[in-house]
Amino acid sequence: MKDVAQHAGVSTATVSRVLNGHAAPTPETRVRVLAAIEELGYRPNALARSLRTTSTQTLGLVISDLMNPFFAEIARAVEDEARSHGYCVVIGNADESAEQEATYVRTLLDRRVDGLLLCPATDDPSLVREVSAGGVPLVLLDRTVRGATCPVVRADGSEALTSLARRLVGAGHTRIGVIAGPPNTSTGRERTDVLTGSLGGLAQVVHGDFRQASGSQAAAKLLDGGATALVAMDNLMGLGALGEIRARGLQIPHDIALAVFDDQPWFPLLDPPITVIAQPTVEMGKAAARSLLALIDGRQPDDVRLTAKLVLRGSLGEAEL
Amino acid sequence: MKDVAQHAGVSTATVSRVLNGHAAPTPETRVRVLAAIEELGYRPNALARSLRTTSTQTLGLVISDLMNPFFAEIARAVEDEARSHGYCVVIGNADESAEQEATYVRTLLDRRVDGLLLCPATDDPSLVREVSAGGVPLVLLDRTVRGATCPVVRADGSEALTSLARRLVGAGHTRIGVIAGPPNTSTGRERTDVLTGSLGGLAQVVHGDFRQASGSQAAAKLLDGGATALVAMDNLMGLGALGEIRARGLQIPHDIALAVFDDQPWFPLLDPPITVIAQPTVEMGKAAARSLLALIDGRQPDDVRLTAKLVLRGSLGEAEL
DNA sequence: GATACATGTGTAATCGATTAACTACTGCTC
DNA sequence: GAGCAGTAGTTAATCGATTACACATGTATC
């Protein structure tokens, strides 16, 4: 910057003003400075700028797993929305581990992100409190924690789940296997509670960990238990369940009915196509980014609840008639 | 930091020394300082540290699309490897657009990333030159550019592709549709060249853009042209092709043979399971991260070429016998 | 007891920007 | 021509760390 100033015959203050679009400099000076910048190929140091202004124009996003297409799409949406407002996004992979999540959150705070989006690995509120205590704007995404005091953006699958339950019961299923998420995550618990609630005593629940392998194992256990219908509570466990069903040579929906929470582009390609509860993923990501930006801006955004929808495609068999 | 120093009755220099594990401070002083840090909940400002040390412990990763599972997995692998070496990764989504790619690269340079991983959207070398001119360590991943002067990490599918071609020809296919990537990307061009080369005159090529919709369109065109086999050059275009095949009610492999470049976890679940050329995605990501870290470390890593493998699953029909 | 040397800590410059406070100049009014 | 306002630009403090250098103290050497 000093070089540019010298080159243009002005002080660094003037260069800075030109850069930040202040009113002061004459058009003439402005042109000279811009020419010098151009000529020297000068690019301002964002670190120095941030240190001085205490704003990094960066959001932190901590999610459980980038390879889970659900979170990848969320990340994509957050990134798009943030960029359109001039913000960058730093993504942290927590790998469904609370410690790694905490590590990442602290790293991001150390780097002075302007705000943080978090998909908490567990519903333990201590990390959230730590962030809030630091005064950093925080929005929870997809999952919440016990007694959360910050804005939360999530999907509401209650209606879809009860409707799904009604259909399964109506079609005469009496042993319905639920491949549930971890009970210490809000989504894991809530979805399962709603579904088993509407199923009366017909549900058998096995908890997985939102990963493919656990889906296979849970499916195996439930099939052994005589289940005639399976509901997987996220797309990766659904993938695992599908693998197990295939490995046993079972036919959907004749031998086993299947529904999965969270849609994927390839579900319609299976034979039969898979019935799902589709979450408005992109909208969730965008809404969360918007809420966070509002918070950074000093406003106090409301919680957002977007409804997930039951999409019937054939894998439930007669339950869809 | 000043507060901590005061609290511990030492100077900021000593605090800094304790923080950075210098030999100097007495165990006694060290304990006092650490106690003060603990008590005040002090966390060093990474921005200030970076400004002074000119090292951010951050890598930049610019990819085409986070929602493409191939890139998501790459990102995941890069992130894992980087973290295990104490580095963070900032991910930028270029959306297969050269301008957006350039914008992102510049943003990352402005933030003084210690090194950059780039999956170039086109094979135009100007952006690469710009980065190199700035003296920032750079490694290309998956794709290269014309006359690249930096390390490149990519998959080599030649063997798998020629082997695939041999099988298709051997099975008597005479009109083989190739859903190719954009000709201005190195992977798009090279894969297509190798395949059409080994197919003699039997190939019909339609170019897509590595996205699902283009895969459907290309498949439609090729099917209209009488193709009896399709090869999609990436997983998203493969997804699109599958959709088109299904929409027309065609049976794989009876009516149409299909192979896809790049494996996905759900390909084995289709009926029949899809034959693919599997890339060592995770290894690519890790290798690229390692190369970049080596470069940052002042060493001069070699190019890496990992071989992609043909995985026969049934969607080629008699070509697999 | 003076000299040298090691050791632990403090002082102050530095990284590269922003910005409040100040100065110099121009032009206008009375 | 003094006084005042307004404008363009400079000087220097500041953000929060690191680190070269200086300094004080304690120990070993002759």
Image: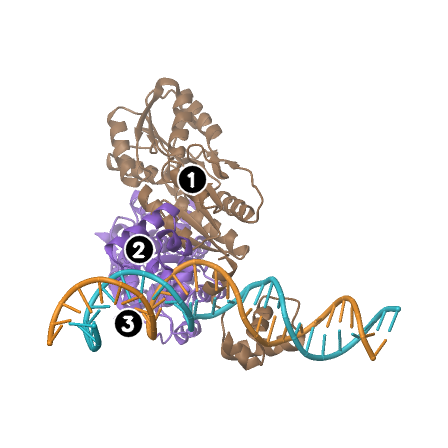
Chain colours: A purple, B brown, C orange, D cyan
Judge the density around disc 2: few (<14), some (14-19), many (≥20) Cα neighbours within 10 Å. some
Check if mark 3 and mark 2 are on a common chain.
yes
For image coordinates 48% across by 43% down, the residue present is B139
Q: CA distance from mark 3 to mark 2?
A: 19 Å
Pointers 3 and 2 in contact (CB under 8 A)? Answer: no
Where residue A289 appears, as percent x and y from the top left, is 30, 61
Q: CA distance from mark 2 to mark 1?
A: 25 Å
- In this view of the protein, which residue sits in the foreground, A135 or A63? A135
Q: Amino acid at mark 3?
A: Gly
Residue farthest to the top, as pictured: B201
Residue denoted by label 2: A83
Marker disc for residue A225? none
Residue denoted by label 1: B129
Element class at badge 3:
loop
Pointers 2 and 1 in contact (CB under 8 A)? Answer: no
Marker disc for residue A298? 3
Where residue B15 appears, as percent x and y from the top left, is 57, 73
> Which is closer to the viewer, label 3 or label 1?
1
Element class at badge 2:
helix
Q: The disc numbered 2 marks a residue on which chain?
A: A
Sequence-earlier tag: 3 or 2:
2
Q: Is residue A201 visible?
A: no
> Which is closer to the viewer, label 2 or label 1?
1
